[in-house]
């Protein structure tokens, strides 16, 4: 039954997390920190890569990409089955409407006109979620999860609301803001996929304290 399947999935996740217990850590990325591992839809996910988005030499946000197994390319990420997550944490105060506009531009840069038009309902839902928060203050953030039975699940720490967008194509398009052929930040893309040369912007294991 569905109840038994859910309990079995939860028990499996607990067993895996127990095995990982000794390896559990907090990864510091700039002034942000990310838990590793996390659980999405009863499935443990580990950080595939993490880094910092800069714009005009200013650190805007830190990001961590979570997967079940290591991936080193955008194609491998999209082909991977099961739950996935990207988690962003602001490193400066960012107006919600500004963030929404930047993400819309990122989507446009990686989509043809026909696909963009087809995804407009989901794009509007995501933009509205960001716009509902007047300012995402430093330390605030949001997660974008892929949950097979639901679709793209967006949560913002600024407002107590979850937005669910069902189309699989939308999740792939949204993640291509960071992983697509024209990413928001080339160095961040390489860091998320674990292919970047180590630099001062890279993450390091930490105790939850802010990094300089």
Image (spheres, grey):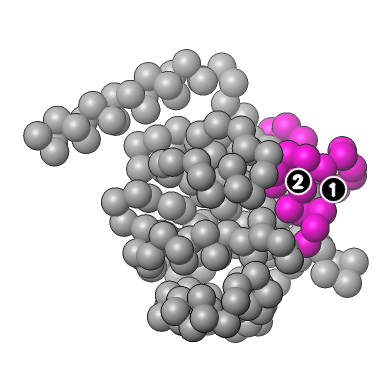
The magenta region covers: 185-212
- The percent coordinates of residue 106 (x first, y second) are 66, 73
Q: Which residue is mark 2?
A: 191
Q: Residue at image x 46%, y 76%?
A: 119
Closer to the camera, 66 or 208? 66
Q: Is residue 45 above or below residue 167?
A: above
Q: Secondary structure at mark 2?
A: helix
Asked whether, in this view, residue 3 is left or right of residue 38, the answer is left
Q: Quadrant of residue 174?
A: bottom right
- The percent coordinates of residue 41 (x first, y second) are 35, 43
Q: Quadrant of residue 17?
A: top left
For the residues bearing labels 2 and 1, Cβ distance under 8 angstroms = yes
| Quarter containing the N terminus | top left
Asked whether, in this view, residue 99 is left or right of residue 40, the answer is right
Of the two numbered discs 2 and 1 on the same chain, state the one appearing first in sequence: 2
Q: Is residue 64 visible?
A: no
Label of residue 201 in the image:
1
Q: Main secondary structure of the magenta part?
A: loop
- The percent coordinates of residue 161 (x first, y second) are 38, 68
Q: Is residue 202 above or below residue 162?
A: above
Distance in Å between CA atoms under marks 2 and 1 = 9 Å
Local packing at callout 1 (Cα closer than 10 Å; few below 14, some 14-19, many 20+) is: some
Q: Nearer the viewer, mark 2 or mark 1?
A: 2
Q: Is residue 190 magenta?
A: yes
């Amino acid at each position: 039954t569905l109840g038994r399947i859910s309990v079995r999935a939860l028990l499996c996740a607990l067993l895996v997390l127990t095995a990982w217990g000794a390896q559990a850590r907090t990864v510091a990325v700039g002034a942000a920190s990310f838990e590793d591992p996390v659980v999405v839809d009863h499935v443990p996910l580990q950080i595939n890569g993490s880094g910092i988005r800069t714009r005009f030499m200013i650190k805007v946000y830190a990001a961590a990409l979570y997967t079940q197994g290591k991936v080193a390319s955008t194609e491998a990420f999209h082909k991977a089955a099961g739950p996935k997550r990207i988690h962003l944490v602001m490193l400066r105060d960012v107006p919600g409407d500004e963030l929404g506009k930047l993400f819309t531009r990122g989507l446009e840069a990686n989509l043809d006109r026909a696909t963009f038009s087809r995804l407009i309902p989901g794009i509007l839902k995501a933009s509205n979620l960001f716009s509902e928060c007047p300012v995402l203050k430093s330390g605030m953030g949001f997660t974008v999860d892929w949950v097979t039975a639901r679709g793209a699940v967006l949560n913002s720490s600024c407002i107590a609301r979850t937005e669910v967008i069902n189309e699989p194509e939308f999740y792939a398009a949204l993640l291509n803001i960071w992983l697509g052929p024209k990413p928001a930040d080339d160095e961040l893309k390489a860091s998320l996929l674990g292919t970047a040369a180590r630099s001062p912007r890279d993450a390091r294991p930490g105790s939850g304290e802010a990094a300089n």
